[in-house]
Amino acid sequence: MTSRTASPAHTDNSDLDRSAAGISVAPRTQTPDPAPRLRQVYALARAEWGQLLNNKVALLNCFALPALMVFFFAGIGGFTGISFGALAPMLVLGTALLFVVYYTLVTSFVARRESLLLKRLRSGEAGDGVIVAGIAAPFVLITIAQTGAAALAAVLWLDVPARPQMALIGLAAVLGSLAWVSLAVASTGPTKSVEHAQITTLPMILVPLLLSGISLPLAMMPEAMQSVAHFAPMTPVVELTHLGMTGQTVLGETLTGLALAREVAVECAVLLGWTVIGWWVSRRTLRWESRS
């Protein structure tokens, strides 16, 4: 295995080993009384959280990077006629999904696979879904917490009016996390090592970022590209958050009633579609043990 400093997630697995021991790694057919799934997820999530706290690079990636990217994209992004307060939660959520949930989860999952920890966990009573949920939970919770904090700060200190549509921000955070967790797991299949993740994750970071409107105004894109962009995995997150913070779409349309409900349903359907695609690919390409 390669150097532990090469990735935010590439750390010692002692905490996760202890977690695996706590769950039990006996063959599944020999565990008639398995621990409840939520308790298993909690044990794995707590161990993954311990790994995160012991890794300064990972902490920087999870807590400082989204805030830094807010100021970066606020200066170059494609949003006009919107205050910084309304813009901040959208940028926090978008960048956190890309770099906290997606990239960090890919490197973490690959590191656990190469150390054979996933194989040991899978040979016990923890199911595949429990393992994925346990490893992903800390990164998802960090993303949701940061987004909620940004929205609250915008209302309290940045003169953004509170509105009922702000519930859409929570919806975007939850469905966006589901989609990007599934895409992260799917991306581990072709990723040979933690260092290789820097290459394999690049298309899934750059293309959705370009098409989301965060880095390039959607209004400046050709009409055909705009149509494609609406089906990218980051665009619905940006659209829902923009609706929640401003009551308008990214293109400046004010929606109410059935028009708003229809728009929300479409954006949610796109995110759920990407979730299904990610899991479908994962079932065919995911590896649970080292290639060597």
Image (tube, rainbow, N blue to C red):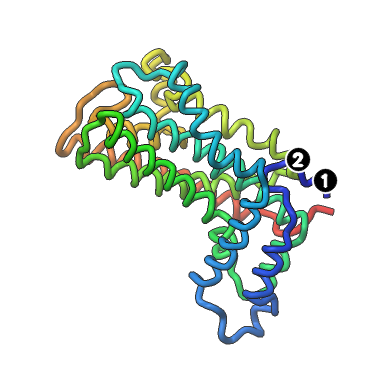
Identity of the residue drawn at 32% across and 25% down: 250
Q: Is residue 122 visible?
A: no
Q: Position of residue 36 (x, y in %)?
A: 50, 76
The disc at residue 221 is: none
Q: Position of residue 107 (x, y in %)?
A: 67, 45
Of 189 and 83, which appears nearest the observer? 83
Please tell me whether mark 1 sits on a helix, a strand or a loop: loop
Q: Is residue 267 left or right of residue 93?
A: left
Identity of the residue drawn at 33% across and 41% down: 169
Asked whether disc 1 touches disc 2, contact meaning CB atoms under 8 Å apart, the reply is: yes
Instruction: Categorize mark 1 by other alpha carbons within 10 Å: few (<14), some (14-19), many (20+).
Output: few
Of 167 and 127, which appears nearest the observer? 167
Q: What amino acid is labelled 1 in the image?
A: Thr
Q: What amino acid is labelled 2 in the image?
A: Ala
Residue extending furthest toward the front = 157
Look at the picture and state if 151 lies above or below 54: above
Please tell me whether mark 2 sits on a helix, a strand or a loop: helix
Of 100 and 85, which appears nearest the observer? 85
Residue 244: image quadrant is top left
Of 174 and 288, which appears nearest the observer? 174
Q: Which residue is mark 2?
A: 6
Identity of the residue drawn at 57% across and 62% down: 46
Look at the picture and state if 80 lies above or below 131: above
Q: CA distance from mark 1 to mark 2?
A: 8 Å
Q: Which residue is mark 1?
A: 2
Q: Quadrant of the C terminus?
A: bottom right
Q: How many marks overall?
A: 2
Instruction: Categorize mark 2 by other alpha carbons within 10 Å: few (<14), some (14-19), many (20+).
Output: few
Q: Is residue 292 left or right of residue 285?
A: right
Q: Is residue 139 left or right of residue 17?
A: left
Q: Position of residue 93 (x, y in %)?
A: 44, 37
